[in-house]
Image (cartoon, rainbow, N blue to C red):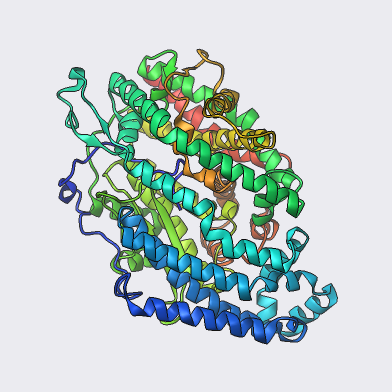
Amino acid sequence: MTDKDGNSAQKGIIKAGEHYLLGCKDVRFDLSDIYADHNDPQIEADLDRYSVLTAQFAKKYKGRLVDGLGEAIVDLQRIYELASKLNLYIALQRACDLKNYEFEKKESVIFERLSRDYGAHLSFFPIEIGELPEEVLAEQIKNIPIVAKHSGFLRHIKAKRKHLLSEEVERALAVRSPFGIDEWDNLFKETESELKFRISDQRFKDHKCYESDLNITEALELINNSGNATLRAYMLKEVNDALKTKMAPISTKCFNLVAGIKNIEDSERGYANVFSARNLDNRISDGLVKSLHQAVLLKGAEINRRYYKLLSKAIGIAPLGWSDRNASILVDESKISWQEANQIVRESFLSFSPLLVELVDRMVSNRWVDAPVYAAKQSGAFNYSVVMPAPLGERSYTFLNYLGSSRDVMTFAHELGHAVHGMLAGKEQGALMSHAPIAYCETASIFAEMLTFEELLRQTDDKRRRLAMLMEKLKGFTNTVIRQISFSIFEESFHEERKKGKISQERFAELWLEATKKLYGDDGDIFKYQDMDFLWSYIRHFFSPFYVYAYAFGELLTQSLFAARARFERDKFEILYIEMLKAGGSKDLVDLLAPFDLKADDPAFWEDGIKVGAEKWMIEAENLFDELN
């Protein structure tokens, strides 16, 4: 999974050849026990086996699920495990080298074969599950243990039945899926990876990156983390200008395509609004998501503006430029080695649960982590968790672009939160239910970040540094909650407007600014909105409509969960939390939160999540600022 902007958030720039200073140069994926390489004949053998298994599945179970549902689930797990093995391997190879045409070619072969066989032989399954009489399904859940275990999986499929089309149409859509949005996404990633930026202004001739080619990740890091406000503004203009001419034309076509396809499918499938398909996948109601947005627009925006007004006073810039949005009040140019980062995260996880540390150690020692920045590597950070055929079993791979900042450490913790979630759920639930809905899975990653933040805060006695850490945490809140909801509002606006026809590049920029102002204020109030009108064009998450609100959802849910710890004995809370992670995709939100006495359908739930986290940090930061003058 990528971070909130589709890129990793790192401080400082390590020029090519300097990664040995961080100790992560050789921290690379080892995928050799999956396949020897992308030409391994076992890949073709596994594709052939997938074809055989799916054909056998259709022959054995089509029209016969009334009597054979238990056996069907067992066989479907085997099919999913094999597909996961193939998908994982080539996706990680591609992410590590976007310019390798052989990887791209192999990826297309795998995706096209899997989609073809799924469409031909498996598209009947969700339709027939949806059409099973309730009494038949209830009887099988009652009498067949494996059906009972997968009742959440089956009932979720049944809930989606009314939005499915005929089997013939679903088959056709599945077969054609590799030739649609994913191809545009690949073009988008490849174009972004080729962007280069150079600091050529004489004002910055003493900077270590002067006259060096920077990729977009490195350029954004200077904007977000440099202590030089002039350099931040310079780089923002360079990035915005390049996006306008090189990325925005492609992104305009891509996002028009995404919205156009979604509008047609939503209409054909009978979804109530542009959010509904995603909300159903997340097993939450439209009303719950609407209340999340309302709470952020009201209470969240209030905290957001208080934070930026305090930042403005602290760094002496008013109004702030958009390049100052991620400025720090205490700039730390020191680097954290890879070994130190591991130790910080291990200690923070250990403070909560030894089991989490065992899982982290297993992943690091097995080389399921890829850390350094290198040529042709995809930007960003993500976690990829799967259940593969035995003896491979449940695996979790963490992809980073580590440059040694404190934020990199938090990113590492974030992705490891996803990783331990994937490992625990994979072992407990198997291939069909290992993945929690997107909105829930962010809870584990943000919980891991909170553990790391608490550990670092505990180690800090100096009030000035404590203030800086609180401001960094509040900055994280604005990026996780406020900015993601502004993305969601922008997304909603262009999906709605796309129903009236294609949207121009300039109109995308206008909608972007309108959404930003709703949460950050009018031009000149706190920010000058200069050189930021094309930043929408590098946000990859818009290829997955309405993915972005999951970050805000996960942050506020996690803060409520964190606050609930005070009501439980430590060991009891640890047990409940581990059980929640093990649940994977087997439960909905109501059932997941019931053991913690939390009710997400309470109208005050989201506002309470803001109060117990961001508002508490905000009050302490304001008090410390006044005390320290």
- Where 236 sits versus 553, above or below? above
Out of 268 and 71, give the one closest to the viewer.
Answer: 268
Is residue 84 found left or right of 68 in the rendered image? left
Q: Is residue 573 visible?
A: no
Instruction: Tell me what residue is drawn at x 45 percent, y 27 percent.
Output: 621
Instruction: Tell me what residue is drawn at x 65 percent, y 56 percent.
Output: 281
Where is the C terminus found, in terms of image quarters?
top left
- Where residue 58 appears, as percent x and y from the top left, is 65, 81
Count every numbered label the image shows and give the total.
0
Is residue 364 found left or right of 599 in the rendered image? left
- Where residue 377 appears, as percent x and y from the top left, is 31, 51
User: Which image quadrant for residue 588?
Assistant: bottom right
Out of 348 and 424, give the one closest to the viewer.
Answer: 424
- Where residue 519 appears, as percent x and y from the top left, is 58, 26
Instruction: Tell me what residue is drawn at x 55 percent, y 26 percent.
Output: 516
Is residue 194 found left or right of 82 in the rendered image? left
- Where 148 sits versus 258, above or below? below
- Where residue 603 appears, as percent x and y from the top left, is 73, 40
Instruction: Tell me what residue is drawn at x 30 percent, y 31 percent.
Output: 222
Q: Is residue 157 visible?
A: yes
User: Which image quadrant for residue 476?
Assistant: top left
- Where 403 sits versus 348, above or below? above
